């Protein structure tokens, strides 16, 4: 039977390799099983950032591990599925490896695109996060090409351990606890505030889709516009699917 690829999928925030996962391999295997479950009808998959807890591509070296996930993504790409990766605030340092290995498109900023007849505004979510000057400074520092050049000169033995340790300590110390995993309400949630403000000058946007916040949210902004936040693959194992008529926020259940 001929396959009919008619759906577009969105997922974010698996943080593969993170030390705060009770069983990192189990998370990767579950994510891979989800990809296998959608392989027959997926036309495109948009990974909306932080799929890895840390990723840095050196000129001839990439992080070890993740072979199940990357292998499955390569299979889907070989079968004709469009693969898109947005860089997040944890896996900023994607360069050209995924593009060369399996033809993925890498997005370094937000993207406005038409998908199956509707207008989408896509991003990880940190791109429009203007709450903290400190966060914006670190984000700009990590994206600076000269700083990346200097960082690449440090042996991976030190950089990988430092980055993963920093991520773990950040969670344990509660630096993200105020916002992490808790919807702030329509009047305080910064992604909602951004979308509402953006709609004033861009009323043609039908769907805003983000990751980053580790919450599941599906909110009507107007008669013709919705905001969805994709959850994560740490506690919700969630994703978004669009078929041209219906948009839904779902959880992967086996």
Image (tube, helix red, strand yellow):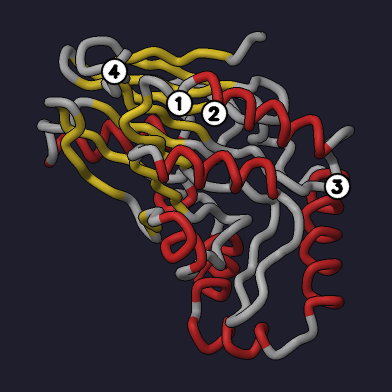
Tag shown at residue 2: 4
Dot in front, 2 or 3: 2
| Mark before the other along the chain sequence, 1 or 3 | 3
Q: CA distance from mark 2 to mark 4?
A: 19 Å
| Mark 1 nearby-residue class (10 Å; few <14, some 14–19, many ≥20) | many
Q: Which residue of the protein is positioned furthest toward the front in this rendering? A: 1
* Snapshot quadrant of residue 55: bottom right
| Mark before the other along the chain sequence, 4 or 3 | 4
Q: Residue under circle 3?
A: 19
Q: CA distance from mark 4 to mark 3?
A: 42 Å
| Mark before the other along the chain sequence, 4 or 1 | 4
Q: CA distance from mark 4 to mark 1?
A: 13 Å
Q: CA distance from mark 1 to mark 2?
A: 6 Å
Residue at image point 36% right, 55% down? 105
Q: Residue under circle 2?
A: 35
Dot in front, 4 or 1: 4
Q: Secondary structure at mark 1?
A: loop
Q: Position of residue 187 (x, y in %)?
A: 43, 25
Q: CA distance from mark 1 to mark 3?
A: 29 Å
Q: Is residue 79 above or below residue 218?
A: below
Q: Observer-nearest residue: 245 or 178?
A: 245
| Mark before the other along the chain sequence, 2 or 4 | 4
* Snapshot quadrant of residue 104: bottom left
Dot in front, 1 or 3: 1
| Mark before the other along the chain sequence, 2 or 3 | 3
| Mark 2 nearby-residue class (10 Å; few <14, some 14–19, many ≥20) | some
State yes or no: discs 1 and 2 in contact (Cβ < 8 Å). yes
Q: Is residue 74 rendered to the left or right of residue 253?
A: left
Q: Is residue 222 rendered to the left or right of residue 154?
A: left
Q: Secondary structure at mark 4?
A: loop
């Amino acid at each position: 039977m001929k396959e009919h690829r008619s759906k577009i999928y969105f997922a974010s925030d698996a943080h593969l390799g993170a030390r705060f996962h009770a069983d990192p391999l189990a998370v990767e295997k579950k994510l891979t099983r989800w990809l296998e479950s959608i392989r027959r009808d997926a036309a495109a998959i948009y990974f909306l950032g932080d799929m890895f807890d840390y990723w840095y591509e050196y000129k001839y070296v990439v992080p070890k591990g993740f072979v199940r996930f990357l292998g499955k993504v390569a299979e889907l790409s070989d079968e004709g599925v469009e693969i898109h990766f947005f860089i997040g605030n944890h896996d900023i340092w994607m360069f050209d490896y995924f593009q060369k290995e399996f033809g993925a498109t890498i997005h370094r900023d937000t993207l406005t695109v038409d998908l199956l007849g509707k207008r989408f505004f896509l991003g990880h979510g940190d791109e429009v996060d203007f709450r903290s000057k400190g966060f914006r400074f670190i984000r700009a520092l990590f994206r600076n090409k000269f700083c990346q050049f200097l960082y690449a000169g440090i042996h991976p033995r030190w950089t990988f351990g430092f980055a993963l340790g920093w991520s773990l300590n950040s969670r344990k110390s509660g630096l993200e606890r105020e916002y992490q995993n808790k919807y702030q309400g329509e009047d305080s949630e910064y992604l909602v505030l951004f979308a509402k403000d953006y709609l004033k000058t861009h009323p043609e946007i039908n769907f805003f889709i983000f990751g980053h916040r580790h919450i599941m949210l599906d909110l009507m902004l107007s008669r013709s516009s919705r905001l969805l936040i994709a959850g994560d693959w740490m506690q919700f194992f969630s994703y978004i699917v669009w078929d041209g008529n219906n948009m839904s926020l779902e959880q992967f259940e086996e």
